[in-house]
Amino acid sequence: QGPYWGVCVLASLIVLLGPALLTNYDVAKEMHALLRIGFFADKKMVRVFTQMLWSPLVWVWRKYHSVLEESEENQRTADYFEKILVMPASEPIGAVLQGG
């Protein structure tokens, strides 16, 4: 249950933090590191379950743009968050869903 519980906790944190997730560069970096762990887990179902986090991440991204505050730190964090959002598309085909 450990990895699945962890992904559920991450999803909850993403939703609870909402656009505040994008106001701190270090938090975005840590989120990226946690997502990479899920993407490269040994078990296929953990990788698939991690992909389900993209729905709340996209929700946060859309909410953030509706309350966008212009600052250099926020822009830097937003640019980094864009890299997180395209992560599944930038990985080699099958890296996430390959058999395990």
Image: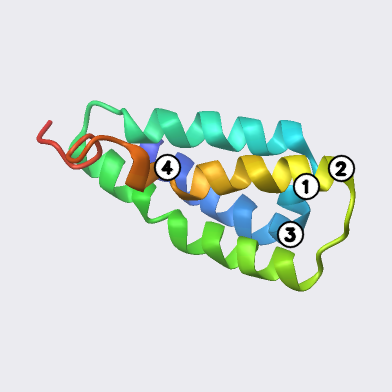
- Horizontal and vertical percent position of residue 29: 64, 31
Query: Is disc 3 placed on a helix, strand or loop?
Result: helix
Question: Callout 1: 10 Å neighbours few (<14), some, many (20+)?
Answer: some
Of labels 1 and 4, the one closer to you: 1
Where's residue 97, x and y in %? 18, 42
How far apart, in angstroms, are the residues tagged by discs 2 and 1? 5 Å
Furthest toward the bottom, the residue is: 66
Whether residues under marks 2 and 1 lie with C-beta atoms below 8 angstroms apart, the answer is: yes
Q: Is residue 52 left or right of residue 43?
A: right
Judged from the image, the secondary structure of the residue bearing numbered disc 4 is helix
Q: Residue at x 35, y 45 (%)?
A: 88
Amino acid type at image mark 4: Met
In what quadrant of the picture does the C terminus appear? top left
- The residue wearing badge 4 is 87
Q: Which residue is mark 3?
A: 19
Query: Left or right: 67 with respect to 63?
Result: right
Tell me which amino acid carries mark 3.
Answer: Pro
Q: Nearer the viewer, residue 5 or 7?
A: 7
Residue 92 appears at what percent x and percent y? 24, 35
Dot 2: few (<14), some (14–19), or many (≥20) neighbours within 10 Å? few
Of badges 2 and 4, the one in the foreground is 2
Q: Which mark is residue 75?
A: 1
On screen, residue 23 versus residue 35, left or right, reads right
| Residue name at image x 53 percent, y 28 percent | 33
Question: Badges 3 and 1: C-beta atoms under 8 Å apart?
Answer: no
**Amino acid bearing label 2:** Glu
The residue that mark 2 highlights is 72
Q: CA distance from mark 1 to mark 4?
A: 19 Å
Write the residue at 51% across / 32% down.
34
Question: Which amino acid does the dot numbered 1 rest on?
Answer: Gln
Compute the Cα span from label 2 to label 3: 16 Å
